[in-house]
Image (cartoon, helix red, strand yellow):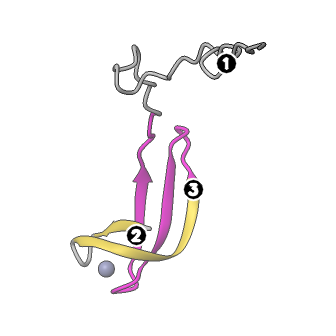
Amino acid sequence: MKAYCFKCRKQRNVKNVEHLLLGSGRRAIKGICSHCETKVYSILKDVEPEPPPWPYPPDLAPEVHSGFEHLTPPTPTVHG
Ligand SMILES: [Zn+2]
């Protein structure tokens, strides 16, 4: 987990991470900069799930199997 440390003025790894729920419903983390031990906070951005691609691009379209491909015609029996 990383957060911006104002003392280091850099993104730093955070230790002792605690997850917070802010009043507005947003989520944040609180922790300690692993470099200088300063308290750091980071507000987590809400990540919206990507919508599925539609219509499918031709090379990604699911293959349609009729179910008859594997059937072979009966071999004729020769009486003689
Ligand atoms: Zn720091």
Q: Which circle marks residue 71 in the picture?
A: 1
The amino acid type, in three-letter code, at marker 2 is Val
- Of residues 43 and 38, the one drawn nearer to the viewer in this rendering: 43
Measured along the vertical axis of the image, is residue 6 above or below residue 69? below
> Which quadrant of the view contains residue 23?
top right
Q: CA distance from mark 2 to mark 3?
A: 12 Å
Residue at 40% x, 23% y is 53
The quadrant in which the C terminus is found is top right
The amino acid type, in three-letter code, at marker 1 is Leu
Q: Nearer the viewer, mark 1 or mark 2?
A: 1
Q: Position of residue 27 (x, y in %)?
A: 52, 48
The amino acid type, in three-letter code, at marker 3 is Leu
> Mark 1 packing: few (<14 Cα in 10 Å), some, or many (20+)?
few
The quadrant in which the N terminus is found is bottom left
Decide whether residue 38 is among the magenta residues. Answer: yes
Q: Position of residue 64 (x, y in %)?
A: 54, 17
Residue at 41% x, 45% y is 45
Q: Position of residue 72 (x, y in %)?
A: 65, 18
